[in-house]
Amino acid sequence: MQNTNDILRVEGLDKAFGAIDVARDISFSVALGECLGILGPNGAGKTSLFNLLDGSIRADAGKVLLDGVDITDLPAHKRAGVGISRAFQVPQPFADIPVFENVLVAARFGGGISHRQAIGFSCEILEQTGLYGKRHRNAGALSLLDRKRLELAKALATRPRVLLLDEIAGGLTEMEGRELVALLQTLKTGVAIVWIEHVAHALTAVADRLMVLHFGQKLMEGPVRETLESAEVREIYLGIEVDDAR
């Protein structure tokens, strides 16, 4: 559904590798302060969709628009520069330098602000993500949860309009997952979030809508509860036969 508050709008994205379609006529939009969750079994095309959104791969057809501007032909580094940032399932910090410097590099070069501005902004981001007290610790010495926080902090330091979360809750304990969810709920107001996640309870605690992919196609999109309770989704994603769905 399109509205004037949409930050990200995707129109009819197609991508194939030989005879394999990884994206076929995918369309959706996300507004500021909204989280669109993406579900789908392995091989559904979720990662390929993110690669199309961040510019890692080029679409065969369709459009990606950011604030109404067509960015379909922009490469990954330029998409980052105009406001699309991605946080990965496996954190990728500079392990041998302090947490603060990891975020400072992202703010300075990804966010495109001066060194002086980047120092203050990095401190704000570290406060926001709960890492300020660990700012002098080498990133490689952090716990998994704090490495996830740092992955988020680096992404936020680039001043994104759209934040792509790539299975960021993966590997966390239930308690750690709740802490991450609480953090993401505080971040929603300033960005549009698109979140791929296999940890369904974490995703549904933050998402406003869900989109389900299957073999590179959009199976359905709608409110969280309605989507999860769909017979098609229960059969394809959860492995429950339609006749057994209640």
Image: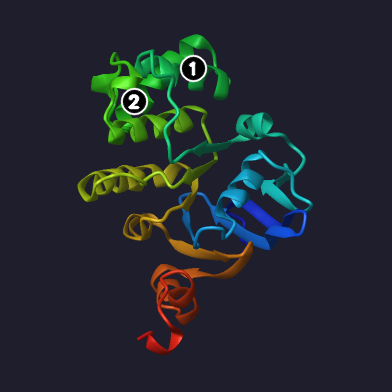
* Cα gap from disc 2 to disc 1, whole angstroms: 13 Å
Disc 2 vs disc 1: which is toward the camera? 1
**Quadrant hosting residue 138:** top left
Q: Specify whether residue 67 is in view.
A: no
Q: Find the residue positioned furthest to the front.
A: 19
> What numbered label is drawn on residue 126?
2
Name the residue located 31 percent from the left edge and 48 percent from the top edge: 181
> What numbered label is drawn on residue 188?
none
Q: Find the residue positioned furthest to the bottom.
A: 243
**Quadrant hosting residue 162:** top right
SS label for mark 2 = helix
Q: Amino acid at mark 2?
A: Leu
Name the residue located 47 percent from the left edge and 15 percent from the top edge: 117
Q: Is residue 185 left or right of residue 161?
A: left
In this view, 65 is above or below 56: below
Q: Earlier in the sequence, mark 2 or mark 1?
A: 1
SS label for mark 1 = helix
Q: Find the residue positioned furthest to the top.
A: 116
Q: Amino acid at mark 1?
A: Val
Name the residue located 43 percent from the left edge and 75 percent from the top edge: 234
Question: 238 or 138: which is nearer to us?
Answer: 238
In this view, 139 is above or below 195: above
Q: Is residue 224 left or right of residue 65?
A: left
Name the residue located 61 percent from the left edge and 65 percent from the top edge: 215
Q: Which residue is mark 1?
A: 105
Residue density around tag 1, few if under 14, some if 14–19, many if 20 or more, within 10 Å: many
Question: 85 or 213: which is nearer to us?
Answer: 213
Residue 189 appears at what percent x and percent y?
A: 42, 46
Residue 30 appears at what percent x and percent y?
A: 55, 55
Task: Quarter of the image for the C terminus: give it.
Answer: bottom left
In this view, 205 is above or below 87: below
Q: Specify whether residue 237 is in view.
A: yes
